[in-house]
Amino acid sequence: MLQMVSRSATTAESRAAGGAAVSIHNLCKRYNNFEAVVPTSVEIASGDFFAIIGPSGSGKSTLLGMIAGYIDPSAGRIVVDGRDIVPEPIYRRNIGMVFQNYALFPHLSVAQNVAYPLKIRGVAKDEIAKRVRESLAMVRLEAFASRMPSELSGGQQQRIALARASIYQPSILLMDEPLGALDKNLRDEMQEEIKRFQQELGATVIYVTHDQQEAAFLADRIAIMRDGAMTQIGSPRSLYEQPKSRFVAEFLGEASIFPVKTASAKLADQTCRITLEDGTEAVIRTGEDGGPGRFACIRPERITIGPKARGLANSYTGVVRESLYTPGSIRYRVELKDAGCLLKVRALPQHNTEVFETGSSVDIGWSVDDMTILAE
Ligand SMILES: Nc1ncnc2c1ncn2[C@@H]1O[C@H](COP(=O)(O)OP(=O)(O)OP(=O)(O)O)[C@@H](O)[C@H]1O
């Protein structure tokens, strides 16, 4: 294993072309009166792993297609290392692409598939053979050079697609749901593989996925798309911990979200008291003060359940309405007494952790920093 890593690293050193910086300025796509992508601007740094997530139809693939060059933008610029690539045809853009359907040429062997981009660029035979060997080593499939695509598993085919997309050392790699066709275990394995691969290649990656966990695992930054617009861009952590809207909070991970009815003036200790629509009162850290039209949000793992909740700034009693033990976590739904508000709670099962059964009364609470305020 160690030997393989060090050999790949050497290979990468000799190949790494480095990633390109990508600046997108007011890029948009209209189909008649419909804006599939509204004017969008974003800076992607060289070597960044940038993921785009969002519901179906939110414009992810359209944006990627404009960068790749197979969809013409209605307006806007895509500046790569200082050069606007919008007027350039696909083959001049030096962009590698990997898509969900592996799209390997079925009648060509693995080696011939990987060699293809170099062959059409007129690279000499010896050089092609050497680079095919290097590329296959990077995806750990040297032994498969003479196989046909039909003789490979789904994961192996996708690794060959990666090798083929990167053999001409593109400075940008675009991936649209590359693991979409694979089962869960293989997806997990391939995520590790893609991460390692990108680090070795040094390319800037723009990666479209439906899967928020996948995006969080792979990406330095994530853009969340909705109705053709990037609603929020940030690190996986900042998006999860400081979502700006209800949409982002619900799209990325689980949350309990309640409309805010009133908010008090600031209290002396930089906190304020809010009242939720069902009458529940909570003390939160001030900053983005919640008033009518705002929402209070709390993540399930931020809630303490059991006797330890008693000393917290927000402390209540409730009834467990649902209790589910799953590998790695215990999930509850707890209804606050006298309020009816239902909270999602996730506890970490440790040695001797008490599991509360459905119907039991429990203490439940959170600190002033755990509840955040969101806009619609
Ligand atoms: N050629 C077209 N003509 C008209 N509308 C289109 C065309 N291509 C895409 N659209 C629309 O543009 C919107 C964005 O599509 P896009 O494929 O970018 O979404 P997506 O976020 O990638 O969705 P998914 O996750 O389902 O692949 C959708 O509403 C789609 O119907």
Image (spheres, rainbow, N blue to C red):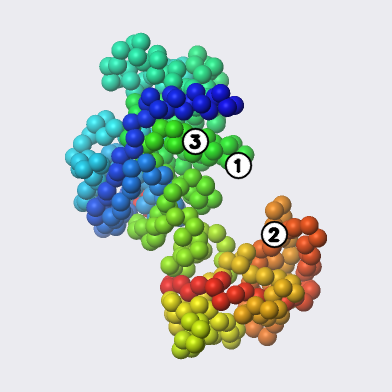
Q: Position of residue 176 (x, y in %)?
A: 42, 41
Residue at 47 percent across and 33 percent down: it is 197
Q: Quadrant of the N terminus?
A: top right
In the picture, residue 116 is in which quadrant? top left
Query: In the rendered image, is residue 141 in sight?
Result: yes
Circle 3/circle 2 CB separation < 8 Å: no
Above or below: residue 60 compared with residue 257: above
The foreground one among 106 and 153 is 153
Q: Position of residue 38 (x, y in %)?
A: 29, 57
Question: First in sequence: mark 1 or mark 3?
Answer: 1
- The CA distance from mark 2 to mark 1 is 23 Å
The numbered disc on residue 196 is 3
Residue at 72 percent across and 67 percent down: it is 322
Q: Which residue is mark 1?
A: 184
The numbered disc on residue 348 is 2
Q: Amino acid at mark 2?
A: Leu
Q: Nearer the viewer, mark 2 or mark 1?
A: 2
In-image side of 306 versus 256 (left or right):
right
Q: Secondary structure at mark 3?
A: helix
Label 2 neighbourhood size at 10 Å, few (<14), some (14-19), many (20+)? few
The numbered disc on residue 64 is none
Above or below: residue 22 compared with residue 55: above
Check mark 3 vs ligand 1: CB closer than 8 Å? yes or no.
no
In-image side of 85 versus 221 (left or right):
left
Above or below: residue 113 compared with residue 37: above
Label 3 neighbourhood size at 10 Å, few (<14), some (14-19), many (20+)? some
Residue at 35 percent across and 10 percent down: it is 126
Label 1 neighbourhood size at 10 Å, few (<14), some (14-19), many (20+)? few
Q: Amino acid at mark 3?
A: Arg
The foreground one among 305 and 14 is 14
